[in-house]
Amino acid sequence: AQSVTQLGSHVSVSEGALVLLRCNYSSSVPPYLFWYVQYPNQGLQLLLKYTTGATLVKGINGFEAEFKKSETSFHLTKPSAHMSDAAEYFCAVNNAGGTSYGKLTFGQGTILTVHP
Amino acid sequence: DAGVTQSPTHLIKTRGQQVTLRCSPKSGHDTVSWYQQALGQGPQFIFQYYEEEERQRGNFPDRFSGHQFPNYSSELNVNALLLGDSALYLCASSLSWTGSTEAFFGQGTRLTVV
């Protein structure tokens, strides 16, 4: 079975400060990992994904994440927060094949608040 | 490209009723997945359709059923609605999902059961 844990349901930062959203996963096979963002009353938008290869992945809007197999983590970072980054962020895992084929398992989400 | 479109955007139903939600995938996509997102929770996988067949199913009762049409559009049906079925229902489309392929999500249908 696969699972995702996002540490911290709410994160608050000042504009210009570092953003760090934590995600740990559990997977019995090499995982594919994703970060999605959800703005109020909207669907999910993909920020970035890790499948294979380089463990530091860059996404849209200046976000990046690093896959650390030894720590089973995929934390999302952005060097300088912008007011427009305020939203809910979801980490998700999809096993590469196997019985979880095609299924995304999401974490509980982290609401990011950005203060002026 | 219109992306993934879902209808209706909002819906209010009474307990015990039946509801049908609709999804048109992104152009060129052949796989449709449905998710339920309760308030304050992450999306939960309901099922996935490919080539008009249910390919995988999550931990949802048989009251939840679906269909995929030859044009790849899809419907989600929920029978005997319960208050706990109130949620945002998200449709995601992808191309012959292999796990690494990006899933594009629609805006969702907000279902309220009263």
Image (cartoon, coloured by chain):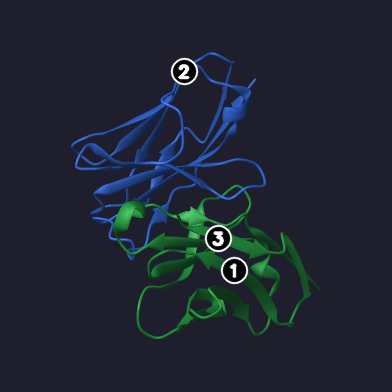
* Protein chain holding label 1: A
Q: Amino acid at mark 3?
A: Val
Drawn colour of chain B? Answer: blue
Q: Is residue A102 visible to us here?
A: no
Q: Supply the letter of whichever chain is green.
A: A
Q: For numbered disc 3, what is the local secondary structure?
A: strand
Distance, label 2 to label 1, CA atoms, is 37 Å
Q: Which mark is residue A4?
A: 3
Could you tell me if the residues under marks 3 and 2 are in contact, i.e. CB atoms within 8 Å? no
Could you tell me if the residues under marks 3 and 1 are in contact, i.e. CB atoms within 8 Å? yes
Q: Position of residue A20 (x, y in %)?
A: 67, 76
Q: For numbered disc 1, what is the local secondary structure?
A: strand
Residue marked by disc 1: A23
Quadrant where the N terminus of chain A is found in the figure? bottom left
Using the image as rendered, state which of residue A86 and residue A96 is in the foreground: A96
Q: Which mark is residue B18?
A: 2
Q: Amino acid at mark 2?
A: Gln
